[in-house]
Image (tube, grey):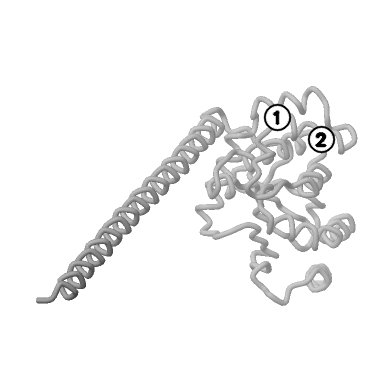
Amino acid sequence: MSEKNRDGKRNARQRLAVEREKQKAAERRRRALIVGASVVCVLGLAAVIGVIAANAGKNKSSHNAGPVVAPSGAQGKDSLAIPVGKDSARATLTVWEDFRCPACQAFETAYRPTLHELTDAGKLRVEYHLVTLIDGNVGGSGSLRAANAAACAQSAGKFRDYHDVLYENQPKETDDAFADNAKLIELAGKVQGLNTPTFQKCVDDGTHDSWVAKSNKAFQAGGFTGTPTVLLDGKNIYQDQSMTPAKLKQLVEAANRR
């Protein structure tokens, strides 16, 4: 074999060895990345689990085992409904809502003028049921705290105005700003005559926490799947894609003509 051929084979072996080493190094890097990514995922999952556990602890303590204290004027089964409007109204709208729920805010924004008009005219009675769906879905306690504060406002005779203020100042769904009682008390300042020592104590003490928890259990037992759930004389109108404030007004006026 010529010297030239031997050199060629030797160079080929060297190139092959170098290439194999590169492949091994690449494989080592790939495995390191996989392991690293796995660690990040596990750590991220652990962090999520930690947050959920922490929030669960908060929610558990917030849903205290104290007596179920319904707000003044609450009606219906187990006194779980807060009524707005006259009892003599011929049509009844039942609303299951969560103050952290963006869809509830959208419903309120679109339908509020019509609801106010119809209730003020004595044609419609609205029964509000307060739930804590968002607390359960994303964690936190803002749904519970806001619902308790709204119940405190009901006892003060200021539910509807405070109800509207809460939706007008609703934080983003993932922002648990309503978990802060001081924030809820501050917002009460927007309702004339509401921000009193009695109201503040009711909010800070969580007077109606167990009542809200019972309302939420009733929501689950009813088989409802989301908020808002809106029923006109028992019929779910929120699922009606053709429903509008004008159509709702027509239905209510028709009920009052019967």
From the viewer's side, name the closer residue of 167 and 26.
Answer: 26
Residue 79, by quadrant, is top right
Q: Residue at x 72, y 46 (%)?
A: 171
Q: Is residue 116 left or right of residue 60?
A: right
Residue 39 percent location from the top left of the image: 37, 45
Could you tell me which secondary element the residue under label 1 belongs to? Answer: helix
Q: Residues within 10 Å of mark 2 (few under 14, many from 20)?
A: many
Q: What is the quadrant of the N terminus in the image?
A: bottom left
Instruction: Find residue 139 and name its label.
Output: none
| Residue 255 seen in the current view | no
Residue labelled with disc 2: 188
Residue 201's place in the image compared with 123, above or below, is: above
Q: Is residue 77 left or right of residue 87?
A: left
Residue 48's place in the image compared with 101, above or below, is: above
| Residue 55 seen in the current view | yes
The amino acid marked with disc number 2 is Ala
From the viewer's side, name the closer residue of 25 and 197.
Answer: 25
The amino acid marked with disc number 1 is Val
Could you tell me which secondary element the residue under label 2 belongs to? Answer: helix
Residue labelled with disc 1: 203
- Mark sitting earlier along the chain (1/2): 2
Whether the residues at callouts 1 and 2 have beta carbons within 8 Å, the answer is: yes
From the viewer's side, name the closer residue of 86 and 113.
Answer: 113
